[in-house]
Image (cartoon, coloured by chain):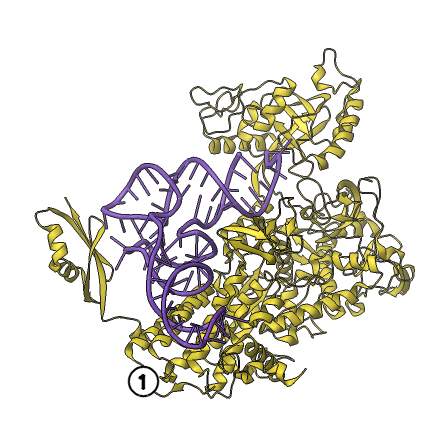
RNA sequence: GCCCUCGUAGCCCAAUCGGCAGAGGCAGACCCCUUAAAAGGGUUCGAGUGUCGGUUCGAAUCCGACCGGGGGCACCA
């Protein structure tokens, strides 16, 4: 690179541009120089209170801590577009502001690097995913550096680093090694469970001991099976979301409402498979309750609440022959109105309940036109297994089902209710069975209509309500609800629920209960590019933890990275993970305490979410090979700030698309780690902000094809591409809409500081906004004016001088300081920029090109803009004579004296309309205000001859005369 | 269908506890600088707050209904 490339603006004068103007090329030069210097001097190294990163802590020991971070990026090959840096810049400005204002700020960045795109690329090219992933990480790291962000580069890591996933595996082992004790509502070590079982002080939990024999009589394998069924990470044979097109199973969260994979849009089928599960449902109540203690947006909390989906009601048992059907309902008050019972098609009791033959005269609508109930059931189950995943979006479609040929007894009135299977009842929710109350439930009403079933109203209808038009779901007193022992008639809903539940408990026919939509987290993936499980299987095929000393379990090298995929709709295919083909790896001889034995390794890998569940903890010291995290560091950076505080990261910024997946999983892991005593904080993210999206205009020609957006010109409100009119649309930035704009282009044209100021000026961080390349020049002009306040464009001389500013200038300065602080503190960077602009404009108009600028105003101006345009600020700060970085200079503090005016103008209203302005002392009270207002001649004119009914005088604000 | 959220100038956005609708930017117009040009400097124009109703002395702000944009959930008993 030649010298002239590095400093064109400083030597060029022929084109009329002043030699020392802040041009894009000068900006580039300044930025590159300061980025090198920051790196060389370790300007943004954050000292820990203890350990290997603690050098320099004494310098910040008396500062409060502040931990700001972004949702770390997944490094794809496509690179960043202008939308990506928005959040990163938001945390960067905040981090820089807090550092200047006296906090010890931690602002790290890492990379979420396991996952499907890298693996798919590897499958296509045969190249190891590590190679492409690391190249992508290097590219993003360079882009972030060029933006001037203040990450502490010593704390960066990627989830694929063995030194990192060693501890991901370790956390898995902690979860595997613990169980949820319902009596205390928290996780405990599995050893304590075994101790209590051995001592006889605890019995195996319901459903964990299939043989039903006492613990002491079980053999070793049976005992281990019982213990394994208690674990927070457990193997479970259950219907899972099998996606043949991807060759893997997916979690519920990764399947769209229409039964397709979120990634790739392939069909997904339910089929039973043995998989690792995480018992997140044990934490449903705490995950729900602790939302109230977090500083998150209400809409985000609501999304989590909906996802957890807590509902209270009752379980009610219906006798059917020698079997018992247990249903879940939120409306036990309507039990008298139950006229039939429905099971999900996959309900375990279906086969044993199904009658041998239809009774004489069975309604043909009930039989599915089959000769026997068994035949009807088999055919309906077959249809449902296919349809349930393909047509689920069609919630409004006609109700279908078949009768099992049997009845169940309503415990409250002895009525015989026909038992159906229907796909509008879901296996996984509640008990997979319902009592149908067509009078008060819309879905049941529709089914009853289609099958000719009776409707018994149990809630008083309002005048004129027509039961033929639909179910009545509104409020009302109970009716038709009495037997010899109990009457609900006349009660309201809440009282009726309480009364009937009490009665059911007394009869042993039911009890109050709570259910959740949240399911346990499916944790196995049939993929190569993920964390291997630290699990081996012994000769009994039971899982055994790999000891900590043998971690990490490294990913083996394989020839083929792809799982076996199948035809999209091959529902009968079975997963075959890539690791199962690494034959030398899958079997291993280990000494786990009872001599060397052969073990078989787990060949599934963990899902992509595992690595992002705890990365915030690793930033505290990614080089620690002894511990996941030093407890002292965790207490310092994340610990609770006081009674009732959850602790956690002080500012976490990321996209709303992670509202339920990542954020719920990370909270769950954190709570387990808290219960086991590894972290003092109860929540990972105390404050969370979703940054807005940046969208951009896109244009289609008359054929509907997208044209290159950058080539479209506007004329008189119309848009043209190569002379032909085009339609304007608005959407995601990207290649497909041909409206890609990259930070690199913008930095090339204006410099990073201009790009930063522009992005931050377009609105509060949470707000989505359009990209408008034409408007970037406004930010460029602002920085040029700030530069001109400090530097003479013609000579390069510093214009600041030790002169007294006018009072008006001091007021402008302190008003700006006050506003800029407010803007930074509330993430409304646009307001901070507006205040800076006002101050700059004031200085430009008061101190012309030939007048020196007071140093005591120029210096704070530079510091005010430093978080937004750090390179420019460093350069000006250094030219103003400082030897040290502006990044550590104290942020200006507004002096109250200059914020309060001696006199204020207040509006005088008559009947709410502004009629005059009067100037009064700033501290004038209501009476003085009224007197001043009455003295105004315009007001006197309005008041003359009128009856004053009331006078409202708000000191400092206004006076309002209300006339009668 | 249910829930959340946002509608302020041609465009992006401000407006603290309900108290004079305008801070800032883009675009437009005009002027200065320039042989000329602009990514330079300056001046200026511009809405009564999506609609309707309510509460209030006073509503962009609070309440209700509706319309429009964005998002979430969607047979969850």
Query: How many other residues sit within 10 Å of disc 1, few (<14), some (14-19) or many (≥20)?
Result: few
Q: Is residue A898 above or below residue A462?
A: below
Q: Is residue A886 above or below residue A677?
A: below
Specify the quadrant of the image occupied by residue A364: top right
A179 left or right, relative to A746: right
Colour chain A appears in: yellow
Q: Residue at x 74, y 54 (%)?
A: A198
A253 left or right, relative to A532: left
Q: Is residue A926 visible?
A: yes
Quarter in which the N terminus of chain A is drawn: bottom right
Q: Estimate the x, y position of residue A872 in percent, counting from the top left.
A: 51, 78
Q: Chain of mark 1?
A: A
How many badges with numbers are in the image?
1
Q: Estimate the x, y position of residue A885 in percent, counting from the top left.
A: 52, 83
Residue that label 1 marks: A804
Tell which residue pokes out farthest to the left in this image: A945
Q: Is residue A130 above or below residue A13?
A: above
Q: Nearer the viewer, residue A762 or A343?
A: A762
Q: Is residue A894 visible?
A: no
A802 left or right, relative to A374: left
Q: Estimate the x, y position of residue A848 in percent, counting from the top left.
A: 36, 79
Q: Is residue A348 above or below residue A639?
A: above
Give the letter of the purple chain.
B
Q: Nearer the viewer, residue A627 or A744?
A: A744
**Which secondary structure, mark 1?**
loop
Q: Nearer the viewer, residue A675 or A582?
A: A582
Tell which residue pokes out farthest to the top in this image: A361
Quarter in which the C terminus of chain A is drawn: top left
Q: Estimate the x, y position of residue A555 in percent, counting from the top left.
A: 82, 64
């Amino acid at each position: 690179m030649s010298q002239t490339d590095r400093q064109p603006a400083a030597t060029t004068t022929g084109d009329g541009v002043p030699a020392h103007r802040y041009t894009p090329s000068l900006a580039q030069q300044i930025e590159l120089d300061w980025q090198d210097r920051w790196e060389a001097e370790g300007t943004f190294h954050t000292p820990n209170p203890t350990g290997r990163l603690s050098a320099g802590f004494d310098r910040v020991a008396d500062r409060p801590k502040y931990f700001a971070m972004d949702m770390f990026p997944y490094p794809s090959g496509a690179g960043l577009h202008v939308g990506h840096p928005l959040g990163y810049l938001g945390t960067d400005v905040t981090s820089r502001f807090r550092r200047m204002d006296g906090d010890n700020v931690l602002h790290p960045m890492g990379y979420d690097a396991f996952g499907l795109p890298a693996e798919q690329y590897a499958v296509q090219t045969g190249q190891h995913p590590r190679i492409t992933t690391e190249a992508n990480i290097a590219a993003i790291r360079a882009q972030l550096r060029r933006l001037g962000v203040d990450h502490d580069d010593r704390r960066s890591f990627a989830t694929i680093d063995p030194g990192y996933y060693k501890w991901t595996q370790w956390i898995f082992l902690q979860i595997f090694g613990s169980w949820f004790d319902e009596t205390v509502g928290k996780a405990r070590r599995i050893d304590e469970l075994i101790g209590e079982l051995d001592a006889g002080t605890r019995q195996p939990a319901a459903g964990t001991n299939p043989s039903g024999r006492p613990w002491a009589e079980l053999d070793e394998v049976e005992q281990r099976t019982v213990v394994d069924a208690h674990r927070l990470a457990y193997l479970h044979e259950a219907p899972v979301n099998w996606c043949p097109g991807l060759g893997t199973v997916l979690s519920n969260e990764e399947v769209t409402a229409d039964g397709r994979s979120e990634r790739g849009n392939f069909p997904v089928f339910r089929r039973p498979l043995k998989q690792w599960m995480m018992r997140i449902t044990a934490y449903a109540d705490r995950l729900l309750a602790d939302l109230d203690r977090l500083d998150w947006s209400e809409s985000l909390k609501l999304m989590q609440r909906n996802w957890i989906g807590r509902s209270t009601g009752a379980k009610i048992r219906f006798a059917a022959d020698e079997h018992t059907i247990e249903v879940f309902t939120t409306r036990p008050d309507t039990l008298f109105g139950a006229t039939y019972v429905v099971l999900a098609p996959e309900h375990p009791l279906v086969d044993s309940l199904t009658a041998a033959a239809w009774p004489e005269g069975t309604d043909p609508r009930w039989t599915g036109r089959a000769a026997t109930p068994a035949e009807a059931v088999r055919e309906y189950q077959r249809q449902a297994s296919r349809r349930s995943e393909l047509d689920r979006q069609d919630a409004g479609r006609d109700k279908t089902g078949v009768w099992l040929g049997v009845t169940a007894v309503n415990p409250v009135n002895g009525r015989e209710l026909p038992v159906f299977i229907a796909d509008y009842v879901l296996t996984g929710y509640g008990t997979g069975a319902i009592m149908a109350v067509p009078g008060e439930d819309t879905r049941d009403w529709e089914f009853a209509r289609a099958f000719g079933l009776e409707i018994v109203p149990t809630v008083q209808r309002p005048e004129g309500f027509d039961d033929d038009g639909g179910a009545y779901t509104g409020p009302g007193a109970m009716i038709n609800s009495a037997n010899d022992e109990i009457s609900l008639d006349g009660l309201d809903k809440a009282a009726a629920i309480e009364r009937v539940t009490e009665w059911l408990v007394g009869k042993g026919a039911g009890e109050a209960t709570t259910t959740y939509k949240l399911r346990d987290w499916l944790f196995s993936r049939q993929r190569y590019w993920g964390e291997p499980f630290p699990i081996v299987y012994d000769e009994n095929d039971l899982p055994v933890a790999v000891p900590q000393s043998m971690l990490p379990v490294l990913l083996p090298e394989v020839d083929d990275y792809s799982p076996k995929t199948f035809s999209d709709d091959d529902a009968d295919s079975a997963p075959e993970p890539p690791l199962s083909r690494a034959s030398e790896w899958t079997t291993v001889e280990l000494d786990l305490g009872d001599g060397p034995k052969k073990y078989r390794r787990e060949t599934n890998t963990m899902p992509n979410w595992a690595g992002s569940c705890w990365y915030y903890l690793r930033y505290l010291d990614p080089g620690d090979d002894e511990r996941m995290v030093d407890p002292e560091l965790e207490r310092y950076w994340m610990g609770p700030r006081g009674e009732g505080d959850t602790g956690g990261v002080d500012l976490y910024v990321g996209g709303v698309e992670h509202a339920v997946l990542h954020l719920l999983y990370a909270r769950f892991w954190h709570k387990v780690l808290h219960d086991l005593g590894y972290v003092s904080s109860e929540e990972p993210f105390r404050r969370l902000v979703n940054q807005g999206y940046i969208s951009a205009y896109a244009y289609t020609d008359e054929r509907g094809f997208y044209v290159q957006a950058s080539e479209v010109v506007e004329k008189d409100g119309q848009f043209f591409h190569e002379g032909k009119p085009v339609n304007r649309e608005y959407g995601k930035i990207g290649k497909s809409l041909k409206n890609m704009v990259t930070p690199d282009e913008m930095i090339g044209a204006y410099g990073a500081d201009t790009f930063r100021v522009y992005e931050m000026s377009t609105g509060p961080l949470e707000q989505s906004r359009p990209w408008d390349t034409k408007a970037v020049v406004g930010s460029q002009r602002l920085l040029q004016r700030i530069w001109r306040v400090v530097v003479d464009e013609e000579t390069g001389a510093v214009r600041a001088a030790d002169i007294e500013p006018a009072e008006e200038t001091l007021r402008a300065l302190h008003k700006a300081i006050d506003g800029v602080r407010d803007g930074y503190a509330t993430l409304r960077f646009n307001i901070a920029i507006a205040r800076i602009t006002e101050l700059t404009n004031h200085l430009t108009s008061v101190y012309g090109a030939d007048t020196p600028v007071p140093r005591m105003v120029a210096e704070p101006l530079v510091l005010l803009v430093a978080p937004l345009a750090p390179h420019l600020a460093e350069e000006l700060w250094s030219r103003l004579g400082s030897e040290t970085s502006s990044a550590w200079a104290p942020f200006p503090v507004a002096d109250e004296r200059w914020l309060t005016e001696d006199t204020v103008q207040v509006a005088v209203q008559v009947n709410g309309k502004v009629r005059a302005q009067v100037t009064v002392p700033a501290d004038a009270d209501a009476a003085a205000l009224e007197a001043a207002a009455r003295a105004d001649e315009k007001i006197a004119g309005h008041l003359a001859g009128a009856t004053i009914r009331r006078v409202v005088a708000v000191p400092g604000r206004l006076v309002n005369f209300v006339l009668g």
